[in-house]
Amino acid sequence: MKMEQLIAMPAQTQPTMNIHLSSGFGEGPTPLAAFDASLMDARVANYNLLCLSSVIPPNSRIVRAKHRTAPDEYGRRLYVVMSQMRQSLAGQYAHAGIGWVQEGDDGRGLFVELHGDDRDRLERDLHTTLDAMRRYRDVDYGPVQMAIASRQCMTQPVCALVVAVYACEPW
């Protein structure tokens, strides 16, 4: 087959990939224990998490739902974009957020993950960051969307977490 024929052939349509967007909250005797509790709440605790950068592949759909952990997936690799904040100061808040934009025709897009102790500032920073990232690219992304998890520290350390789950793989 000649190169011209290869170029002229229509591209195969890729199946839609669901990226599950889940949040979790945790409390524990240490910040790390609170983080583990938030992973349990988001249903991603029994994996080896591999954090990705912020690119949403074409043909992706964001689904706001907890990840469904299969019993045989214990210890497997889980590819995620994750935002988490731990807080140990009584009365203070932990806010974790993921913002995203997606192009309407094929679902490609961008994630950003940020955290902070001021929710309003976090929302502004998610918008500002995505707006800047859009300016660098020649793609017509849709409006900014976001998911934010918040938790106030009362007596024990807390953790707020938002995680976008791409895929699970065995070792």
Image (cartoon, rainbow, N blue to C red):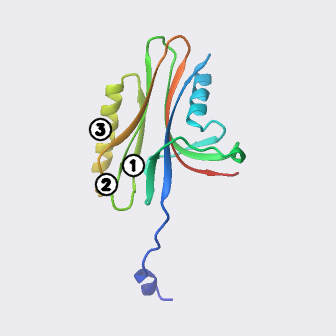
Question: Circle 1 sits on which residue?
Answer: 110
Q: CA distance from mark 1 to mark 2?
A: 11 Å
Question: Circle 3 sits on which residue?
Answer: 128
Q: Earlier in the sequence, mark 3 or mark 1?
A: 1
Tag nearer the camera, 1 or 2: 1
Relative vertical location of residue 31 with respect to residue 168 in this rendering, above or below:
above
Q: Earlier in the sequence, mark 1 or mark 2?
A: 1
Mark 1–mark 2 CB contact (< 8 Å): yes
Question: Circle 2 sits on which residue?
Answer: 137
The crowding category of the residue bearing disc 1, from other C-alpha atoms within 10 Å (few below 14, some 14 to 19, many at least 20), is many
Task: Give 136 or 29, whichever is nearer the viewer.
Answer: 29
Residue that appears at 28% across and 44% down: 131
Relative vertical location of residue 26 with respect to residue 142 in this rendering, above or below:
above
> Which amino acid lies under the numbered mark 3 shown in the image of this protein?
Thr
Q: CA distance from mark 3 to mark 2?
A: 15 Å
Q: Position of residue 114 (x, y in %)?
A: 42, 34
Q: Position of residue 14 (x, y in %)?
A: 48, 66
Q: Secondary structure at mark 1?
A: strand
